[in-house]
Amino acid sequence: MTTTGYEAYESAGELLRALSAPIRVAIVAELGVGERCVHELVEKLGAPQPLVSQHLRVLRGAGVVRGARRGREIAYSLVDDHVAHIVADAVSHAREVRS
């Protein structure tokens, strides 16, 4: 089902709210490279496991990421690549503005 008119703006606002925390931006950027388990995200981001899990729940609830069981772990990936591009562009823009 496609979203048209004002609904598209509402959906975009919900997506941006889901990305409003810097750690969620970092998680999405990391998942843009490929699927990761929680322990891999914890190691890469240097954040405590409960915090990473909490933010993954928010991203799952917003439909940004999905989890698939891989043995005893859950491998997280992006639902689609559009979000990875949005985050990459935002980070690139932020770096340009600071230089």
Image: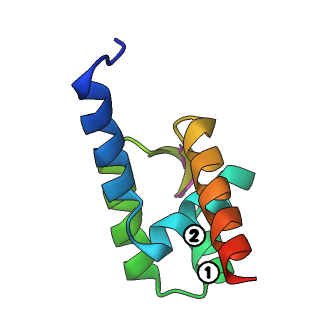
- Residue of label 1: 45
Say whether residue 7 is magenta. no
Which residue is located at x 60 percent, y 88 percent?
Answer: 46
Q: What kind of residue is marked 2?
A: Ala
The alpha-carbon separation of the residues under discs 2 and 1 comes to 7 Å
Q: Quadrant of the N terminus?
A: top left
Give the structural element (helix, strand or loop) at label 2: helix
Which residue is located at x 39 percent, y 80 percent?
Answer: 51
Judging depth in this view, the residue of 53 and 33 nearest the camera is 33
Q: Which residues are magenta?
A: 69-73
Q: Earlier in the sequence, mark 2 or mark 1?
A: 2
Pointers 2 and 1 in contact (C-beta within 8 Å): yes
Give the color scheme: rainbow, by chain, secondary structure or one colour: rainbow
Which residue is located at x 36 percent, y 40 percent?
Answer: 12
Give the structural element (helix, strand or loop) at label 1: helix
Q: What kind of residue is marked 1?
A: Leu
Which residue is located at x 60 percent, y 60 percent?
Answer: 90
Q: Main secondary structure of the magenta part?
A: strand
Residue 58 shows in this picture: yes
Q: Quadrant of the C terminus?
A: bottom right
Residue 68 image position (x, y, % from top left): 52, 43
Residue 88 image position (x, y, % from top left): 67, 56
Residue 25 image position (x, y, % from top left): 52, 65
Judging depth in this view, the residue of 5 and 21 nearest the camera is 5
Mark 1 neighbour class, 10 Å CA radius: few under 14, some 14 to 19, many 20 or more:
some
- Residue of label 2: 26
Side of 79 where 44 appears, left or right: right
Side of 79 where 92 appears, left or right: right
For discs 2 and 1, the disc positioned in front in the rendered view: 2
Side of 91 where 57 appears, left or right: left
Relative to 53, does residue 9 appear above or below in the rendering? above
